[in-house]
Image (tube, rainbow, N blue to C red):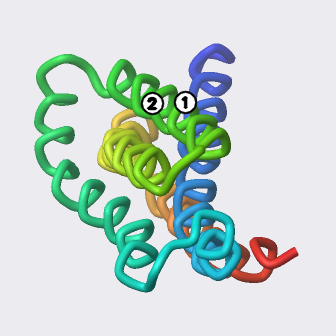
Amino acid sequence: MAIKDVANRKTALIVTTLGAFIIPFMGSSINIALPSIGKEFDMDALMLGWVTTSYLLTSAMFLIPFGRIADIYGRKRIFRLGFLIYTLASFLATLSTSPYVLITSRVFQGVGASMTFSNGVAILTSVYPVGEKGKVLGINVAAVYAGLSCGPLLGGC
């Protein structure tokens, strides 16, 4: 096995695991911030519900289509584009001046998350040999649950 192959595999593991951590982390940490968001934008409970629902609905809705699109146009390309969209939408969310801008940015976060999440495991299974897939998929899944667990804890800080 070439050194370049090992480096590419490790890079793929680090990047996909980062995505597997940060997306659930952000999704679960916003729940702690909802009371502050509600006060900042003078939002009622219905509008606050859309802050979380818009993200979850969009990411669930586009998960399978982006998996198929990645099969056609390339997993790496869709994964990177999803990371870019997610990052830009997160930045837009921090600059929100109204509840509608915040909810719209959460929709775009959901689109980026679905592009990233639908391809992370596929990328790992395509670059690692059969004997190592269990280990790297375990690391990836652990990152998901670490993100879900750390989100409320660190989101309240």
Q: In the image, residue 155 lies at what x, y percent?
A: 75, 72
- Mark 2 element type: helix
**Are the residues tagged 2 and 1 within 8 Å (C-beta)?**
yes
Q: Is residue 72 above or below residue 103?
A: above
Q: From mark 2 to mark 1, how far is it between C-alphas?
A: 5 Å
Residue under numbered circle 1: 88
Q: Quadrant of the N terminus?
A: top right
| Residue at the image position 64 percent from the left and 72 percent from the top | 29
Is residue 67 positioned above or below 41 on the image? above
Q: Position of residue 35 (x, y in %)?
A: 65, 82
Please name the residue shown 32% across and 43% down the image: 111
Residue occupying the far right of the picture: 157
Q: Which residue is mark 2?
A: 85
Q: x, y (%) of residue 22?
A: 62, 54
**From where the camera sits, is residue 27 visible?**
yes
- Mark 2 surroundings within 10 Å by alpha-carbon count, few (fewer than 14), some (14 through 19), many (20 or more): many
In the image shown, does 62 or 2 lie closer to the viewer? Answer: 62
Q: Secondary structure at mark 1?
A: helix
The amino acid at mark 2 is Ile
Query: Label 1 crowding class (10 Å Cα cut-off): few <14, some 14-19, many 20+?
Result: some
Residue at image point 49% right, 38% down: 86
The quadrant of the rendering that contains the C terminus is: bottom right
64 relative to 91 in the view: left or right: left
